[in-house]
Image: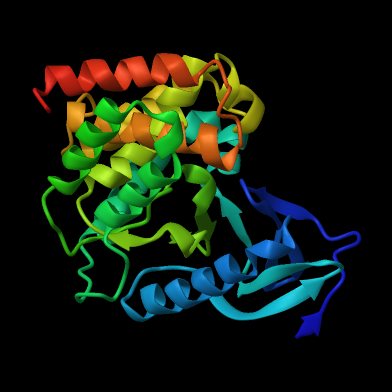
Amino acid sequence: MKEIHIDGCPVIGTGAFGKVYRIDADTVVKVYDDPANLPLIETEQERSRRAFIKGIPTAIPFGIARIGQTYGSMFELIEARNCNDFLISHPEKADSLIAEYAAFIRKIHAVKSEPGEFPDARDVYLGYLECMREYIPGEIYGRLAGFVRAVPESSGLVHGDIQMKNVMLSNGGMLLIDMNTISAGSSLFEFAGLYRTYIAFNERDPGNSERFLGLSADICRKIYYRTAKLCGVDPERRDILILGWLRFLHVVIVELSSPESPAVKPTLETLRRLLDEENIH
């Protein structure tokens, strides 16, 4: 395994599991904070390759490197910048960027997968639920599981976390990074992820997007609502909201290891209300 050093290398992206550094003019490495994430790196590289072969514009993976005591995933990425940072630098271009972003999402969703080629998005969300079983009342857990299983089957590709930080502008076009979340399923799961990022976090933690994305709550709402409408999706669909709050809950309880967070109880109450409104028993 190649060993590389990142001292002095510029950070071009930050995510839940680590940072992305530019090594040279056409190479970046996504360095994971926890050495135990090596299987996650291997999964991301394999899914990136499969997606690239399917015609998904994505950074080309070409190896895993050791960085000190941890590991990194190496990609070819020529002069790229994520859409989130571009928007911060060019707020006057928000409308045109969102329109291009929505068209890119539609392009991704139009790609079809073969059976077993990618995980089923329903199974991914059922996995999120299973990780939280001890923290969710049994009655809500059962209703949520039944709801997820009932989402219509689809062979369309879903990135799963297609927020603007994971969409890069490169040579005038857009491409995806962070491919470990890609799956096959209904686009409802895609917009649930966007709802979690741009709406749910600010509702439970006002100012969250300013701190973590550098974007105001107003521009986050504009990104979510305008993108959904341009993709022909009702941004207030209850099934999107249910999946979005489920995904938010998983981030808080599992990814942030905060089952005692004050955000948990009101989120469970919101999920119960939405399930009631949808008559899901």
Residue 231 visible? no
Which percent across, then down, holds residue 193?
A: 38, 40
What is the quadrant of residue 153 in the picture? bottom left
The residue at 61%/36% (across/down) is 257
Q: Nearer the viewer, residue 91 or 141?
A: 141
Which percent across, then down, holds residue 125?
A: 33, 48
* The C terminus, quarter of image: top left
The residue at 24%/41% (across/down) is 145
Q: Is residue 182 left or right of residue 219?
A: left
What is the quadrant of residue 266 in the picture? top left
Q: Nearer the viewer, residue 145 or 256?
A: 145
Q: Is residue 166 left or right of residue 155?
A: right
Which percent across, then down, holds residue 136?
A: 38, 29
Tally the marks.
0
Q: Nearer the viewer, residue 106 or 39?
A: 39
The residue at 30%/30% (across/down) is 138
The residue at 45%/30% (across/down) is 135
Residue 102 visible? yes
Work out whether 71 lies above or below 150.
below
What is the quadrant of residue 53 in the picture? bottom left
Work out whether 120 lies above or below 113.
above
Which percent across, then down, holds residue 95?
A: 38, 33
Q: Is residue 239 left or right of residue 39?
A: left
Residue at the extreme bottom of the image, as rendered? 1
* The N terminus, quarter of image: bottom right
Residue at the extreme right of the image, as rendered? 7
